[in-house]
Every structure is written in C-alpha cells, then in structure tokens.
Image (cartoon, grey):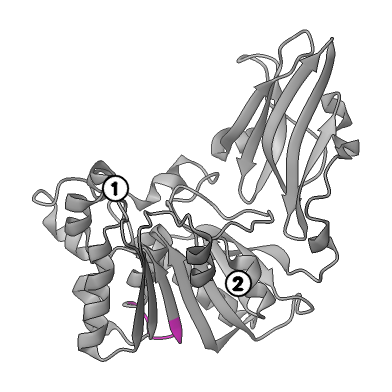
Amino acid sequence: MFTGWLTSGAVKDFALLENGRKDVILLGQLNTEIQIYTQRSAYDPLIKLTGWNETHENLVTTCVESKSTITFIHSSFGAPPEIYCINTIDQLNSAKKVTKENKLFTERNLPKGISYRWINKDDETEIESVLLYPPNKHQEKNLPLLVLMHGEPYSADLNTFRTDWFYIAGMMATEYWLVFQPNYRGSTSYGDEFLHGILEVLIARPGKDVLFGVDALVQDGIADPERLAIGGYSYGGHLTNWLITQTTRFNAALTGAGAVEHVNSWGLADLALYRTYKLGGFPWQVSNRYQQESPIFQFDKFRTPTYIAVDENDYRVPTSQAYLLKRSLHVLGIPSKLIVFPGEGHILKTIHGMRKLK
C-alpha cells in the first residue's frame, strides 16, 4: 500500500478498467507530480504503478469488442503534453505516443525545472516549490528571481508543461528569469493539515511560507537579492498585494484579480461563504481578523512599483478591489499602472486580452 499518497494525496481523475474485475484506475497527485494508481476494491490496497514520473492527465478507458484501451496525456517541465495509449495497465512503461501536436516545442531549448524545498522557521513546516531555470542556466547561481504564485488557493504547481494564458512561468523563464512557484500552505496534495493551514490566517501564513522561500533561495546563492520581482493571479494576486506590504525587497510586482480588503469582497464577490469559512466568521463577528488579513490596512508600507490587471466584470474578485489598490498607490506616490479588460469575467477568454496580459 502506498501510504504516502493515502495520507496526503489528491484524486485528480479516475476510470474503470475493462479487465473483467472492474478495477479502478486513478490519477493521484502527490506533491508536484500526478501518477497512475490502481485499486481492485475499497478494501484492497492502492497500488502505484511503475512508469514515468511527472504528470498524467485526462485519463480515459474504452473497450470495443473485448479490446481495452487506456489513454492519457503526459507532460513534464521539458516535455510538452501529448496523448499516449496502452492496452493493459502493465504496459505503462512502454506507452505509445499517438500525437505529435507539440513537436515544435521539443525542437527548442526549454527551461529546466526542479523541486526546491525549504522550512518556514515560524513553525518548522517544510514547503515545496517548482523552480524553473532559464534555458542554458540550469543550476547557475545569482539569477534574477520572479516569484509567481498560483491561485484558488486549493491548487498546486506541478512538474508539467503548461501554456494556458495564466500559466506564464515557462514564458517568463525563457525571458531569463528564475521562476519560483511556491506550493504554500493551502496547496493540495500535502495532507489535510497543510491544506487547512490557512484557516483564520488566510493570507499571513502562506505569505510567510513564500518569504521564507525567497530567503532560502538568496541564502543558497541561487537568487540575486538585488533582482527580485513578484506576481500572481486571483489568490496569487491576493498574496502579491499582501507581500508588498511586508517587505521592500521586490523591485516590481504584477497583481492580477487580487483582493486588498475582505469585507468588500465578502459583500460583492460570488463566494461570500468562502471568506466566512476561511476567516472563521462573518465580518461583524471577527472584524479584527478581516482587518489583519487585508493588505489595505498596511498600505503605508508600500514601496514597490506595481502593475495591476483586472477584468471589468469579475464576479469573484470585484473590480473595486483593483481601484482601491490603484488609488492607494497613487496617493502614496508609488509608480503603478492599471489595465482593465473590458467585458471579461474572472477568467480571460479573448485572445487579445490574453496577449495583452502576457
């Protein structure tokens, strides 16, 4: 039985094997990888299959005239996603690639990624990240660092190849940034205690996770302390807004769809119960906590030039949050720029909007 996954992992997809026994095959995320597992019944052990590492997605099983096929997408830092097929689960090591849709990327010099870990010295919790090195800079020292934080927060950055509009890590690495993607408290596949570690400390605790990570990268000589930038979208934007009130070490910030004040978000966003749960009560019940976890009440500490991106019709992070941030930066004399994408919701859907953001 693979106990590590049972105590910490997250199920990302599953299907039934057409093998006469109806075994379950599933994709299980543990830390920064998604692997394939099987289980014969609820009472049998979960078995991790020996195969490739990195990330598997979109699992599909079919059976035609007693012939079964298992299909999945596989990718990693240096290998773009393609579709693979096998006939039986024990053929995983020799899965056949059936598409070449991203062959162009394999002919390019791509960023290289590693897992990087450090300790939050406040409570001795180990935190993991994905660290993407620029092409031809793998394992070099004293590199310019971009801290890029994922959203939700119930998500995680993985050993995978992503080109979605808000997954800009690979693109930024090709621009010769060392890209640091921390799986801070609240990220998935590190166990329930880790996942719920943001309750009542929605921004402050994961924020400290990130800052200790930056400290470690500088102390290890990997990141240049004079060339640091930070950014994120949605919850990653929330964290960006918080972190630039906690330190002046960042030379620039990019915040997308990020909140600055939780009472306003509780009243106007579509996920009111989200903040009620995460902050431990309604605004009138735990008003001090709403204030303590809201960056706006520490804006006097701002020193970082900031680029703000927001969608006009964002239902999850009200556009008013961006205007609060922009006005505050203006009053404080901090260089800033605000871009509003007309007609867009929380997720950009138009090509010109995606290109503009990138």
Q: Which residues are magenta?
A: 246-252
Q: Residue at x 72, y 59 (%)?
A: 77
Q: Residue at x 37, y 54 (%)?
A: 345
Q: Position of residue 129 (x, y in %)?
A: 59, 61
**Which residue is disc 2 drawn over?**
179
- How crowded is the residue under tag 2: few (<14 C-alpha within 10 Å), some, or many (20+)? many
- Does 208 sit left or right of 229 as displayed? left
Q: Position of residue 256 (x, y in %)?
A: 40, 66
Q: Residue at x 33, y 70 (%)?
A: 242
Q: Look at the numbered disc 2 and give the secondary structure of its residue.
A: strand
Q: Nearer the viewer, mark 1 or mark 2?
A: 2
- Does 36 sit left or right of 259 as displayed? right
Q: Position of residue 350 (x, y in %)?
A: 49, 58
Above or below, comparing residue 34 to residue 107 in the picture: above
Above or below, comparing residue 16 to residue 293 in the picture: above
**Which residue is disc 1 drawn over?**
278
Q: Decide whether the magenta segment is chiefly helix, strand or loop.
A: loop
Q: Look at the numbered disc 1 and give the secondary structure of its residue.
A: helix
Amino acid type shown at disc 2:
Val
Q: Quadrant of residue 106?
A: bottom right
Q: Nearer the viewer, residue 125 or 327?
A: 327
Is residue 120 something that shows in the picture?
Answer: no
